Every structure is written in structure tokens, then in C-alpha cells.
């Protein structure tokens, strides 16, 4: 392949993105693909500033928060995603600009404007949108992870975010019900990816 593929994992917190992504990466490598696993916010300077907001979101304005996500993504695209795609790699990212449109949209920003402001970022070949109710999400965060909810994970916020994710109609989105056993969800994810490969006429080595 002369050009790689970009696959984004999206969904509210607790849907299992961080568990499912490496499983898909392992599967794709078994089929002969060179895979880059990455995530947003990144570990860069802007990503670290975003992560500091998890426990004190009120520290900055909503516009500044959005700006930080845009700056972090621009750096991520320029330094990581685009070079990998040009090398023919398959890039799997845990969150992308759909999360920004949903989370910052839920906080009061205009989702349509957010999509426009992310026009510098390449559109994914596939968005795996893991779906789950806010109630199930919170239960997973508290009970399975044993974590306290951060400022982005409050129930009213997650319900708004889930509603926005549900409203997105981009053709690259495939919705995957995530309140099922991990293996079942992974099979659905692999099926969606195999359909993408078939659509692109890409043959697997495995």
C-alpha cells in the first residue's frame, strides 16, 4: 500500500476504547499490516495541559480548552499521523476530532464549528464509535477501574456527549454496541475493519 489507513476509536468514557484498540492492532499485524497505536490527548505539551484539566476543568475558559485540543491535534497530525500514513502504516488513534466535537460541544461550543476548525486533520477511513449508556459507562469507571469520576466524566456531561455522538452522521462512522463482553465487541470491530478492507480492495497477508 502506498498510503496507509486511519482508524479512530470514539465514544464516551468507559466504553473500552483503550482495551479494544491494542486487540485490533494485534489482529491487523497478524494480517501483515504495519500498525501505529496512538491517542489523544497526546503526551505533548498541549496534551499534558489538557490532562491537567481533568481534575480542574474550570481553570480555563471553554474557548481556551477547545484551542488546546486543536493545538494538540495539529501537532499530532503533523508529527505523527501524516508521516505514518505516508509510510503506508495503519494508524489507530484512541480519540480524534469527533471526541472534541462531542465533549466540547456538550460544554457549549458549536459542534459544526468544531468540525470546520478541524479541517486540517485528515478524515479517518473508519470511525469505530463504541456506544453505551452513561449509566453503564459510569459503573465501569467506578467499579471496573476503581476510579473517581473526573471533570469530563460527570453524568450530565456524559449524557450530552452521548447524544452528540448519536447525532453525528458522517459516512465513516460505524457504531459498535459496547455493553457486551470484550470478545464480542472485538469481533464486531474486526468485522467493520474487514468490510473497510474489502471496500478498498486491500488484500490481507494473513
Image (spheres, rainbow, N blue to C red):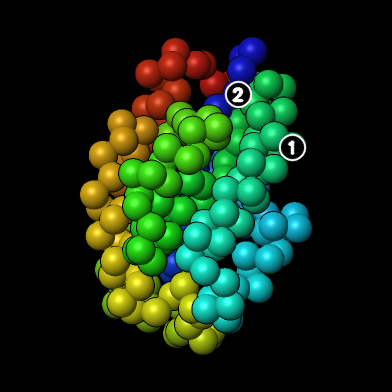
Q: Quadrant of residue 191?
A: top left
Q: Is residue 203 left or right of residue 161?
A: right
Which residue shows up at 61% across the image and 56% down it?
A: 68
Nearer the observer, disc 1 or disc 2? 1
Q: Name the foreground residue: 118 vs 10.
A: 118
Indicate the quadrant containing the C terminus: top left, top right, bottom left or bottom right: top right
The residue wearing badge 2 is 4
Q: Which sits in the foreground, 149 or 46?
A: 46
Q: Quadrant of residue 140?
A: bottom left
Tell which of 131 and 107 is nearer to you: 107
Reply above or below: 199 against 84: above
Residue in the image at 44% along x and 75% along y? 153
Q: Pointer 1: what residue? A: 79
Q: Is residue 93 left or right of residue 100?
A: right
Q: Position of residue 87 (x, y in %)?
A: 71, 22
**For the residues marked 1 and 2, what is the alpha-carbon distance in whole angstroms?**
15 Å
Mark 1 burial class by Cα count in 10 Å: few <14, some 14-19, many 20+: few
Q: Position of residue 197 (x, y in %)?
A: 45, 23
Disc 2 secondary structure class: loop
- Residue at 69% over, 43% down: 75
Q: Are marks 1 and 2 in contact (CB under 8 Å)?
A: no
Dot label at residue 68: none
Above or below, 113 against 184 in this view is: above
Residue at 31%, 35% in the rendered image:
170
The residue closer to the viewer here, 143 or 134, is 134
Place residue 55 in its image quadrant: bottom right
Residue 132 visible to an observer of this rendering: no
Image quadrant holding the N terminus, namely: top right
Question: Does residue 50 appear left or right of residue 182 in this picture?
Answer: right
Amino acid at each position: 500500500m502506498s498510503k496507509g489507513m486511519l482508524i479512530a476509536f470514539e465514544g464516551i468514557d468507559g466504553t473500552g476504547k483503550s482495551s479494544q484498540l491494542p486487540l485490533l492492532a494485534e489482529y491487523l499485524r497478524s494480517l501483515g499490516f504495519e500498525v501505529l497505536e496512538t491517542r489523544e490527548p497526546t503526551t505533548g505539551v498541549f496534551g499534558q495541559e489538557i490532562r491537567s484539566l481533568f481534575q480542574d476543568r474550570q481553570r480555563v475558559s471553554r474557548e481556551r480548552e477547545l484551542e488546546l485540543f486543536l493545538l494538540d491535534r495539529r501537532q499530532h497530525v503533523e508529527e505523527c499521523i501524516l508521516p505514518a500514513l505516508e509510510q503506508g502504516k495503519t494508524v489507530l488513534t484512541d480519540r480524534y476530532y469527533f471526541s472534541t466535537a462531542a465533549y466540547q460541544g456538550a460544554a457549549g461550543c458549536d459542534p459544526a464549528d468544531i468540525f470546520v476548525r478541524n479541517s486540517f486533520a485528515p478524515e479517518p477511513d473508519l470511525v469505530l464509535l463504541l456506544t453505551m449508556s452513561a449509566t453503564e459507562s459510569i459503573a465501569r469507571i467506578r467499579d471496573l477501574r476503581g476510579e473517581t469520576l473526573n471533570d469530563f466524566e460527570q453524568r450530565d456531561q456524559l449524557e450530552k456527549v452521548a447524544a452528540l455522538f448519536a447525532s453525528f452522521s458522517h459516512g465513516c462512522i460505524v457504531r459498535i454496541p459496547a455493553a457486551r463482553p470484550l470478545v464480542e465487541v472485538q469481533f464486531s470491530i474486526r468485522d467493520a475493519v474487514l468490510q473497510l478492507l474489502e471496500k478498498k480492495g486491500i488484500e490481507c497477508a494473513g
